[in-house]
Image (cartoon, helix red, strand yellow):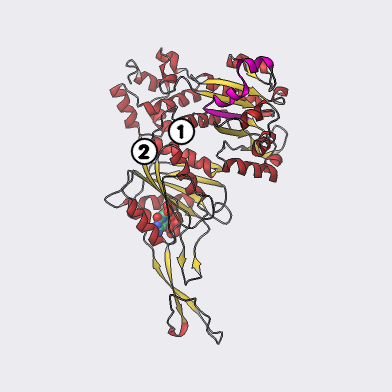
Amino acid sequence: MTLDNKISNLISLLGGTGQVAHHLNIKSSAISNWKKLNKIPKNKYNSLIELSNHLNIDINSFLNTNNLNTMNLNKNINVLLIICGGIAAYKSLEIIRLIKKTEIDLDIVMTKSAQQFITPLLVTSLNGKKCYVELFSVEDESKMNHIHLARKPDVILISPATANIMAKLACGIADDLASTLLLATDSKIILAPSMNPIMWNNIATQANYQTLVNRGVHFVDPEKGDMACGESGTGRLAEPKLIFNTLLSHLKKKNVLNNNLDGISVIVTAGPTIEDIDPVRFVSNKSSGKQGFSIASELADRGALVTLITGPVSIPLPKVNKIIHVKSAQEMFDKTFSELPTTIIICAAAVADWKLIPELNNSIIIDNNNKIKKLKNNNSILTFKTIENPDILASVAQTKERPKLVIGFSAETENIINNAKQKLISKKIDLIIANDVSENKVFGSDYNKVFLIDKDSCEEWDSQNKKNIAFKLADKINNLLS
Ligand code: CTP
């Protein structure tokens, strides 16, 4: 789509080619191309809007057109914002402001306690529309009943979300307008919690969090920092811009905005592999499969055709096109190659580097079909010969059928960034996600802190839920493919 020969001016307004390329995570040459062609690819519009919001620049008035915010926003997009009672309620005003800059149709519900912090009058003025507060309101029910309000939105955003609304949502309690809507909706729900760190870490809140995550509710996790109550820890509302961007990304996923992963084929390897020693013993590692499964699930949600090749795990299987269960590294290697070609491969599996061949002292022959027995005289020395397993990631990256995008993980306990960079180069891959897997840090946890490294840059992502990482990675992949 052409924007009246003004692409160059628009790019300058947004800080120039370098800044725009950096923000959109694309090469400067791509931006130069847009300028030359006076054309911007459709799938970049939202990133440009995000950048303009970030810079507080109204690109509509500059362009003298209302197009940019609406170009890939379907007119009928509706978002319901539920504001709960917490000090961070005032930050929802910024979220309203950001949403109002788009063509999204916004309805707002405030709980009783939210009204202790900000008034419905203020919210109504900002949104230019009635703010709903009562479940049993004769006037509201005659105009728009609560069931309609629950069915209408493409996404429901709760910000700030209190421990109370999380508990009610997890238990199915419907005792006010907000909780009743949540029970009556089949829309995507995003929660941005904010509360005192002890409340956030309370076993009940964490159990509710887990229940909701397992049901597909998306969280913009609270951040670490000083709280208004004087304490510090995890519980501060995420930045409004991040919450807004998450909302936009979910709208993309719902196909009301562009969804560029439609029909794209992806292989994801996940979980540990195990190497048998005898029929009852094996060696493996502590990978839970959570990060790989989250990625597979996120990409499938966005329309990608995902084949998940997983080692033995004990977590619920995600909804993807195809799941292949394997045990050993060799099996994972064979199955991966049998699924090529694909557009993308993401190797998140913690693959065993060696096969172990057991050997007993005194050159006693070991029968592979039976359990290895100790020697009668208490004198057994069991040793292992090692045979290196094939490197799946490196082999795929160097095969003729190389996917367009080859992404690996790097599990490190020291020199995280340097070691990961070396793997990126030696395995000839496009992107590596490095994490510190020292004791209790990643394996089995719902959280991960990662560095995204390519040949030119290293991005640090704060510690966050593995589903969030998958979500952001999917956005990144979207950018890389376009
Ligand atoms: N990988 C693989 N096949 C292997 C070993 C690793 O596909 N036989 C992939 C992993 O899935 C990951 C990346 O390679 O995406 C790096 O794995 P990692 O375990 O961090 O490193 P290794 O390559 O095994 O090297 P080292 O154990 O020496 O750190």
Seen as rendered, the residue at the extreme bottom is 377
Q: Is residue 461 visible?
A: no
The amino acid on which the numbered mark 1 sits, given as a three-letter code, is Lys
- Region of the chain picked out in magenta, as a range: 138-159
- Identify the element where label 2 is drawn: loop
Using the image, tell me which numbered label, if any, was put on residue 45. Answer: none
Q: In the drawing, does residue 183 fall left or right of residue 42? A: right
Q: Is residue 17 magenta?
A: no
Name the image quarter holding the C terminus: top left
- Identify the element where label 1 is drawn: helix
Indicate which quadrant contains ligand 1: bottom left
Give coordinates of residue 354: x percent, y percent: 42, 65
Q: Is residue 151 magenta?
A: yes
Give coordinates of residue 15: x percent, y percent: 42, 24
Q: Which residue is mark 1?
A: 253
Q: Residues within 10 Å of mark 2 (few under 14, many from 20)?
A: few
The amino acid on which the numbered mark 2 sits, given as a three-letter code, is Gly
> Between disc 1 and disc 2, whose residue precedes?
1
Give coordinates of residue 2: x percent, y percent: 32, 19
Q: Which residue is drawn at the image coordinates 38% and 63% (left, top)? A: 389
Using the image, tell me which numbered label, if any, was put on residue 263. Answer: 2
Q: CA distance from mark 1 to mark 2?
A: 13 Å
The image shows a total of numbered marks equal to: 2
